[in-house]
Amino acid sequence: MDKVLSGIRPTGFLHLGNYFGALRNFIKMQEENDCYFFIADYHSLTTHPKPADLRTNVKNVLIDYLAAGLDPEKATLYIQSDLPEVCELSLLLSMNVYVGELQRVSSFKEKVRRQPNNVNAGLLSYPILMAADILVHRADKVPVGKDQEQHLEMTRDFAQRFNNFYGVEYFKLPVAYNFGQALVKIPGLDGSTKMSKSDNENSCIYLSDAPEVIKKKVMKAVTDSGPTEPGQPKPQAIENLFQLMRAVSAEDTVKFFEEEYNKCSIRYGDMKKQLAADITAFNAPIYERILELRGNDEYLRKVIERGAEKAHASAAPTVRDVREIIGIKKL
């Protein structure tokens, strides 16, 4: 059975794009693999969140994970900061990582460009901590998005460099998890091609959104004045609405509005009302579970405590082995 690791930074609630982009596959993945899902609170510190916000966001992500279908009896769910081994391994790995290669990382250069007043050491060393997250469990596979491919490749480089430097074959070289199918990309309500809260929170439908909130957001979605010729290509904002509808609505519903568009008789207001209703129906089981979990702190605490125990049992032997390979031993 393969070990699979995935993490998400606690920046708030998970949205519909997260669900279609990864969570559905995570739920399937836990049935066939030894999965470790963690909430990356250390990674989020590069943006300097307020302490109260950080604690709230960690809890929100945990609740969303559980409500969406991750099962703590089948997978290990833990908070990154509950696993001290990851910090020690990050430090040990850093001794064989060079500043120049970190400065060439695409995501680091982009962060420097976008936030020149917050170029902290955590941003520079981000790939090392991410490598430690993966290697501490000696993971075989890691589900990563396009923006994280370089970080995974660096993890492989760091692992191979450690093996070569100490003349061992200790670390596996993890590979990107292939779900065996094209991932669904959920667009934003603002006309953007990706639902992302980092770009525009109003473009997102959160798993924790109440039905009235979903309807309000969808009714404000960007549209145009409508097609003027039969078969006219859809602008991006309109294609977004249809793509959302294909994800949550019945086939005959999608077909009806496609025909209305092609006949130049579509009423976007009617389409939005239908889309809001279908998103609400699709999300209803998750939303109801979220409401239940919000009032069950005891259960959440048990999940995290058990997850920390299981994560520690996996990580501690790795750090112990690495210390011995390096030569750190008691006198």
Image (spheres, helix red, strand yellow):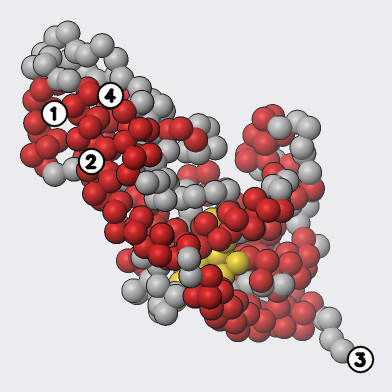
Mark 1 vs 2, N-terminal side: 1
Binning the other alpha carbons within 10 Å of mark 1 as few (below 14), some (14 to 19) or many (20 upward) gives: some
Spatial CA distance of label 2 from label 4 is 18 Å
In percent of width and height, residue 211 lies at: 32, 44
Instruction: Check if mark 3's residue and mark 1's residue have beta carbons within 8 Å.
Output: no
The residue identified by callout 2 is: 277
Choose mark 3 or mark 2, whichever is in front.
2
Helix, strand or loop at mark 2: helix
- Going by the numbered disc 3, the residue's amino acid type is Leu
Q: Which residue is mark 3?
A: 331
Distance from Cα at disc 1 to Cα at disc 2:
15 Å
Q: Which mark, residue 238?
A: 4
Residues at discs 3 and 4 in contact (Cβ within 8 Å): no
- Position of residue 61 relative to residue 168, above or below, is above
Q: How much space separates mark 3 and mark 1, taking CA atoms? A: 75 Å
Q: Which part of the image, by quadrant, shows the C terminus?
A: bottom right
In the image: residue 126, left or right of residue 182: right
Q: Nearer the viewer, mark 3 or mark 4?
A: 4
List the residue tagged with mark 1. Answer: 257
Residue farthest toward the top in the current orientation of the protein: 228
- Secondary structure of residue under mark 3: loop
